[in-house]
Amino acid sequence: MSNRCLRPLAALATIVYLSLPCAAQPFEMPTVRGEVRADSRVDFRDYRIELADLNHRGDVYRADLSFDGSFEFRRIPAGDYQLFVVTQGGDIVHQEFVALNPHLTQISVRLSATGKGPLVPGTVSITQLRHPPDRKAFQSFAAAQRFAAAGSPEKAAEELEKAVRISPEFADAYSNLAVQHMRMRRFPEAVAELTRALAIAGPNPLMLCNLAYAQLNLGRVSESLGAVHAALRLDAGYAQGHLILGSILAADPRTRAEAIPHLERAAETIPSARATLERARSAMQAAAAN
């Protein structure tokens, strides 16, 4: 059950959301349900969900997680929210943006495992807390997601460029802009954008692996190896990291044997890794036969 709290979160005391001009009372949704899933075992009862209303400064809604990761809010307005997964001690371990409306009342949150335990507090940087995205930047970010889903990376990139112009500390927008540029094979831009995102948000496996992929496509193998090793130090089980590292090692006959365990790990959850694994094994067998 959720409780409405009309004061800012203690952890978010430095955030100032821009107020909107007075408008009609937003539609109030009777029930919003959701679930949190994690890549490793988590006692979800140690965490809660908090929704910070981007339209109304100071309005924060809270819901404790059930043992199975489910949660429920009652009677909250439709609108744009910043969602936080928070420990009972007040540490923020995950944040994302959600847009709720009468047609979208189900929230799904995915938490990545790390090498240091199920969840690691402190994954939201001070810069992000002090400079939350402007509502217009979030609107451009949401529009970019729709264009990306429709297969229009060029239009998605335009919206994301608009988002970072409005909110220069919007790390997720830089990260997603880099993904769109990689889809267009504009790897130099992607490297610059991921470097900026990491400077704002701090190191995390997803951005580091995307950076490694972009660097690899530019022939910067040494830098790519550095980025992917950093990702795996943060999350030893990160499948994308094992795939990239395995692919780099498999390309060199001298390190091909080292690639196999990484590709095997990646193939457990990434179907495309199986083909890379089989090619590496075949190359090793062919080399042994000669």
Image: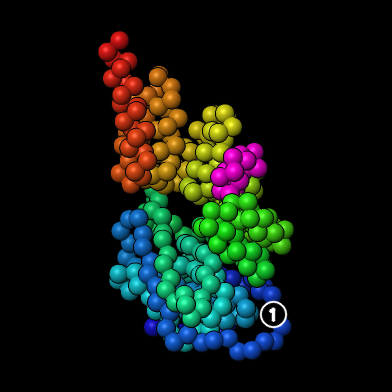
Q: List the residue tagged with mark 1.
A: 20
| Residue bounds of the magenta highlight | 178-190
Question: Residue at the spot x=47%, y=77% of the render?
Answer: 103
Q: Quadrant of residue 286?
A: top left
Q: Decide: few, some or many residues near mark 1? Use Cα within 10 Å; few <14, some 14-19, many ≥20.
A: few
Q: Nearer the viewer, residue 14 or 94?
A: 94
Q: Secondary structure at mark 1?
A: loop
Amino acid type at circle 1 is: Leu
User: Which quadrant of the figure contains the C terminus?
Assistant: top left
Q: Nearer the viewer, residue 148 or 28?
A: 148
Residue 197 visible? The answer is: no
Question: Residue at the spot x=40%, y=19% of the render?
Answer: 253
Q: Is residue 188 left or right of residue 93?
A: right
Q: Is residue 17 left or right of residue 249?
A: right
Percent x, y of residue 204: 50, 50
Question: Residue at the spot x=65%, y=59% of the render?
Answer: 159
